[in-house]
Amino acid sequence: MTIYDLHSHSNFSDGVLPPCDVVARAKLRGVDVLALTDHDSVAGLDAASDAAAEHGMTLIPGVEISVTWEKFLVHILGLNVDRSNAIFLQGLAKLQVIREQRAQLMAQRLEKHGVRNALAGALKYAPNGLVTRRHFALHMVELGLAPTLPKIFERYLRPSKPGYVSTVWATLDDTVRWINAAGGVAVIAHPHRYDMSATSRRRFAEQFAALGGVGIEVVCGGCGQDAVQSNAALAERFGLLASAGSDFHDPNSSWTELGKLEPLPANVYPIWSHERFYTK
Ligand code: AMP
Ligand code: MN
Ligand code: MN
Ligand code: MN
């Protein structure tokens, strides 16, 4: 049986390990097919592909795109994308500019709330220059502002908290278009995690499918049976193919370990059955 893990992060976004170590760890953990899906960047994929070739593993080139849909921040994965496609790369470049501007604004706000050296501190944890809220949170834990990352998010980095900068990311329409232009498949990431009503979640999945999105994560790292079932119900209802990914960031977070995933439920079809999933 082939083991798939189609959602992971390296230190080219907010993961801890460099791409080659993510791949090596996936190999050790028994993964056969790994997607590296850094936030809004494909810069880690060359190193990941080289490492996968050395280990005799299949690396699916991927990305996790930040999207503003209605009033919500949602994440769309692009799997098996051609990372030289100009339309796709221009889209990501826009998001990287938005990210940099947001990081500067966040730093100013956080400094007003007692976070010393906010931007430099976050950058210390972001060796490849792409700054996420997680990097600010790591710096803030180091400063002793709260003991854990979730507590920092709760107190400072969530909507309506002092360090939150409301940001307009990519549209759902553009995101699916960029991924399709790059020959990939678009997949809704961790649908159960969005703080939206069941009605909004269905409308979101329906619009995504109508725009040409093809998949939805049904099994995620650390998600319970309730989430798997509600995700599978969305897949069935809107004809989406099911994906499975740990959302690995950090070897010290055991609930999102590489390859630690339940099998897909029987009532869904796997994303790896899609013709655009593999060969290119
Ligand atoms: P950003 O894309 O810059 O808004 O950063 C979001 C990232 O922060 C996510 O991809 C997660 O890795 C991380 N994150 C979000 N919420 C939490 C939380 N409550 N606790 C820990 N990490 C979080
Ligand atoms: Mn992340
Ligand atoms: Mn995500
Ligand atoms: Mn992720």
Image (cartoon, helix red, strand yellow):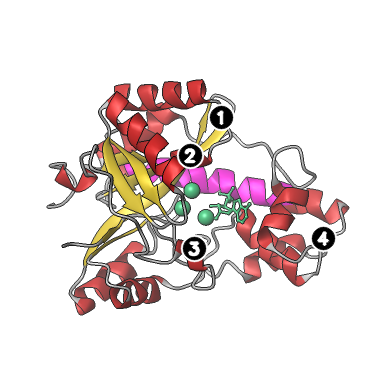
How far apart in space, not on screen, are marks 1 and 4 (Cα)? 31 Å
Residue kind at label 3, given as amino acid type: Trp
Q: Residue 204 got which mark? A: none
* 97 falls in the magenta region: yes
- Which numbered marker is on residue 255? 3
Q: Is mark 1 within 8 Å of ligand 3?
A: no
Tell me which segment is drawn in magenta. 87-106
Q: Quadrant of residue 47?
A: bottom left
Which sits earlier in the primary sequence, circle 2 or circle 3? 2
**Looking at the picture, does residue 238 appear above or below residue 195?**
above
Label 2, label 3: how far apart the Cα atoms are? 16 Å
Q: Quadrant of residue 173?
A: top left
Instruction: Measure how far apart labels 1 and 3 are at the Cα level.
Output: 23 Å
Badge 4 amino acid: Val
Residue found at x 74% / y 54%: 107
For badge 1, the amino acid type reads Met
**Residue assigned mark 2:** 192
Magenta span: predominant SS is helix
- Disc 1 crowd rating (10 Å Cα; few below 14, some 14-19, many 20+) is some
Marks 4 and 3, Cα distance to the nearest angstrom? 29 Å
Give the residue drawn at x 39%, y 76%: 21
